[in-house]
Amino acid sequence: MFKFFSRSKPATEGDKEAIGLLKTDMHSHLIPGIDDGAPDIETALQLIGGLHALGYRKIITTPHIMWDMYKNTRETILERLEWVRTTVKEAGLDMEIHAAAEYFLDDYVAGLVANNEPLLTVKDKMVLVEFSMAYPSHSLKDILFDMQMQGYQPIIAHPERYIYLEQNKAFYGELKDLGCLFQLNLLSLTGYYGKSVTELAQYLVKQNAYDLVGTDLHHFRHLEALHSPALSVQLRKLLDSGKIRNAEL
């Protein structure tokens, strides 16, 4: 039997109450050994147990599909998902687990879309996507448009982490005008990724731009940081907007 949450401090009642309102985490890296997330099944179970202790009862984990680094496919992700589900059940942990993917909008994903290959979705036709954090992508809008032509609704992962957009905030409006949803990384509210990311997150919160919230959980340091005392207060304010859709997933 695995001992859950042994590497992090216990969740407070405030943590559980605020995060429990979300019900579902829709961005994490908890399928073992296929990207920069959980390296093995034991770690995956510890992290899943940590999310359960925080109040989550459903996980839609999202391994990277980034062809230069993580050559994952729909088939390999779904196969390993069954392994995780079986192991979690055997360990006696009450957590509903599904898988989508975090698609890096590169030539490989453009090819999937062009060939009408089915994409892994968070729910219905919602697809989590990301792009370069170092520089703007010239093909981004074209790929997003092609996805939408096939009926998909892109979710932009952690838009606050593209810090070069600090000088071009109008681009956020362009993405929203295209019909994209925005997903906030919870830790962006805590300073975990740095001051610039937190400031962009706060800007987007004020714009009521966010539709979904995810942990983007990779490892135990992330799990520890999710216990930031300020997080519950900020999350409650965000949920008061009435726009956050996690509970619908």
Image (cartoon, rainbow, N blue to C red):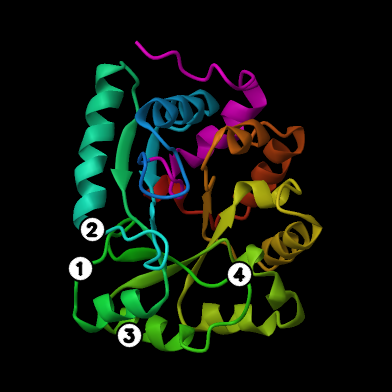
Examine the rendered structure and indicate whether residue 146 appears above or below residue 42.
below
- Taking the spot 57% from the left edge, 84% from the top edge, the residue there is 174
Q: Tag 2: residue type?
A: Arg
> In the rendered structure, does residue 52 fall within the stretch colored magenta?
no
Residue under label 2 = 74
Residue under label 1 = 118
Residue under label 4 = 133
Mark closest to the chain's N terminus, 2 or 3: 2
Instruction: Identify the secondary structure beneath mark 4.
Output: loop
> In the rendered structure, does residue 27 fall within the stretch colored magenta?
yes
The residue lying toward the viewer, choosing from 219 and 158, is: 219
Mark closest to the chain's N terminus, 3 or 1: 1
Magenta region: which residues? 1-30
Query: Residue 192: horizontal and vertical position, in percent?
Result: 72, 47
Mark nearest the camera among 4 and 1 is 4
Q: Quadrant of residue 207?
A: bottom right
Packing grade of label 3 (10 A; few <14, some 14-19, many >=20) is: some
Q: Is residue 244 left or right of residue 146?
A: right
- Taking the spot 27% from the left edge, 25% from the top edge, the residue there is 87
Query: Residue 31: horizontal and vertical position, in percent?
Result: 35, 41
Mark nearest the camera among 2 and 1 is 2
